[in-house]
Amino acid sequence: MPAAEPRSIVAFLPIISGLALAFTITAVDPLVLSLNMPQVSRALHVPPDVVGFLGGASTLVVAAAVLAVGSLGDAFGLKRLLMLGLVGDIVVNLLSAISPDYGFLLVTRLLDGLALAAVLGVSMALLKVSVPAERRPAAIGIFMAIDMVLCGVTPALGGWVVEAVGWRWLFLLAPLLSLIALGLTTRYVTEPPVLERRGVDVVGVSLVGFALLTLVHGVAEAENGISQLQAWLPLVISAVAGVLFVIRERRTPEPVLDLSLFRSGPFAVAALASLTLNFLVAGFSFVLGQFGSVILSLSPRTIGLLFLPGTLAVAAGVILAGRLIGKYTPRPVLVTGLLVMAAGGLLMAATATPTMALWIVVLATWLTNLGSLVASSAVAETILAHAPPGKAGAVAAVQPAFGMTGYALGPAVYLLLLNFFFQRQWLNDADERGLSVTEADQAVDATRSALAHSPGTAGYDPNLLQRSGLALGLDFTNGLRLTLLIVSLLPIALAVAAHLLMPRRPRPER
C-alpha cells in the first residue's frame, strides 16, 4: 500500500498562527514598552538609573526561567503550560495598566516575565511536535512572517495609543493578542503525549537566574564607573554563579541545560546567534526610542511607525527563507540574515545626525528587522533539529533562553556604551569651547533634569541647549554612532563563524 501523501502546509496554518501569535507576544510586550519608555518614565518619575532595568525586567526573568519551563512542558504538558502562560500575561498586563508608581510597575514586569517564559518556552516546541519534519522549515518561515507583521504593526499602534489615550492603555495590546492566541491554541493545537516525568533542576535554574540578574545589575551600575564596588562586585558574583552553573549541569543526571548539545558546532553557533540577534534588536529599539524622542523630536506614534514600512516585504522574505532552509541548509540563510542586520546598524552609524532624513532611519530599522527574522528562522530549524523525542521542550527552550538573555542585556549594554561615548563627546565639546569639566557636567545635568521632568518636551529645548553652551544634540548623536559601530561588529563575526562551522548539507533528524 503506497505511503500517504504528506499534508499540505495549508492544513497546519491554524496551528502555526496560534503558536506564532503566542511567540510574538513575548517580543511585542517588551518592545512597545521600550519604545515608549520616555513617556512611562516621566509619568511615574522613574530614576534614570532604573530605566534600563525596568525596560529589561521581564526579559531578564524570561531568560532565567525559560530553561525550567521547557523541562516542565515536557513533564506536565506543553499545551497546558502555554495556555497557563497566556492567561498569566493577560492578568499581569492589566495590573501593569493601573500602576501607581514605578515600583509597582517593576513588580508586575517581573511577574510578566514568568508568564512570558511559559509562553516562549513551549511555543516553538509545540511547533516541533505538531508539524512534520519535512514541512517544518516552511512552517517556521510562516511562523516568523506572522511575528514580523505583528512586530511591525504593534509599535505604530502602541505609539498611537500613547498619544491618543495615554501610556496606561499600552498594556492592553498584549492581552488582546493573548486572547486570540488562547482561542486558536485551545481549538487547534493537540497536547503531545508526555513520555516521561522528570524533575526540574531547581539549583541549576536558580544559579543561571542569579548569574543573569547580577550581570545586568553590574552592567547598569558600570555606567557610574566600572571600578566602583557596586559595579564590579555583581559582575564577579555573576561570573562565579556562571561557573557553578556549568559544574552543576555537568554533574546532575537531569540538567536543565544539556551541555553536550554544545559539542555540536552548528548548535553552538545557533545558540550564540539567538543571543546576538535579540541583543541587537532590544538595544536598537531602546536607543531608537531615546534618539527619536530626544534628538529627532519624534512623537511616540512616529517612532512606532518606523517599524511599519516594508513589513509585508520582510514577511515575504522570511517565508522565502523558510523554503530556502528546507531546500538547502540553515547555513546560508543564517549568514545572510546576520550580514543584513549588521548593514542596518552600520547604516545608522554612518548617517545619524540631529537632522537626518527619516527615510534613512526607516531603512535602518527595516534592515535590522529583516536580518533578525531571517536569521531567527535558521536558528530555530538548527536547534529544533537537535531535539530528540520527549525532550522537545528542553531543547527548544535553548533558543529563547539565549535569546532573552540577549534581550535583557541589550538595553543595559547599549545604554552603557551610549552614555560612555556621549560623555566622551560632550567632554571634548566642552574642552573646545573652553568650559571646565564641572561647568560642562552641570550643563548636562541641567539639560537631563529638564527633559526628565518636562512631559511636554519631545527633544532638546533649543533655548536650554543654547544656555548650556554645548552642542549636546550633536554630542549625543555621535555617541549613538560610535555605539552602533561597535555592536555591528558582533553579527559580522558570528556570520564568519556560521560560514566556517555550520554544515553545507542537511544533518539527519534526531
Image: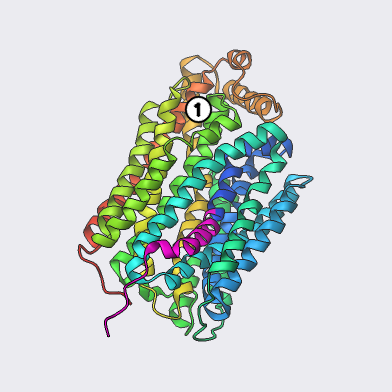
- Which residue does the image show at 35% across and 66% down from the upper left? 135
Q: Which residues are magenta?
A: 1-24
> Taking the image as drawn, is residue 402 in sight?
yes
Label 1 Cα neighbours within 10 Å, binned few <14 / some 14-19 / many ≥20 = many
Total number of numbered labels?
1
- Which residue does the image show at 25% across and 54% down from the upper left? 332
Q: Is residue 421 left or right of residue 343?
A: right
Horizontal and vertical percent for residue 124?
47, 65
Q: Please tell me in which quadrant of the rendered image residue 39 appears.
A: top right
- Which residue does the image show at 47% across and 54% down from the upper left? 406
Q: Please tell me in which quadrant of the rendered image residue 80 appears.
A: bottom right
Q: Is residue 364 left or right of residue 420?
A: left
What secondary structure prevails in the magenta region? helix
The residue labelled by disc 1 is 476
Instruction: Please state which of residues 241 and 498 is positioned toward the viewer in this rendering.
Output: 498
Q: Secondary structure at mark 1?
A: helix
- Quadrant containing the C terminus is bottom left
- Which residue does the image show at 63% across and 28% down from the upper left? 448
Horizontal and vertical percent for residue 174?
62, 51
Three-letter code for the amino acid on which mark 1 is drawn: Phe
> Taking the image as drawn, is residue 65 in sight?
no
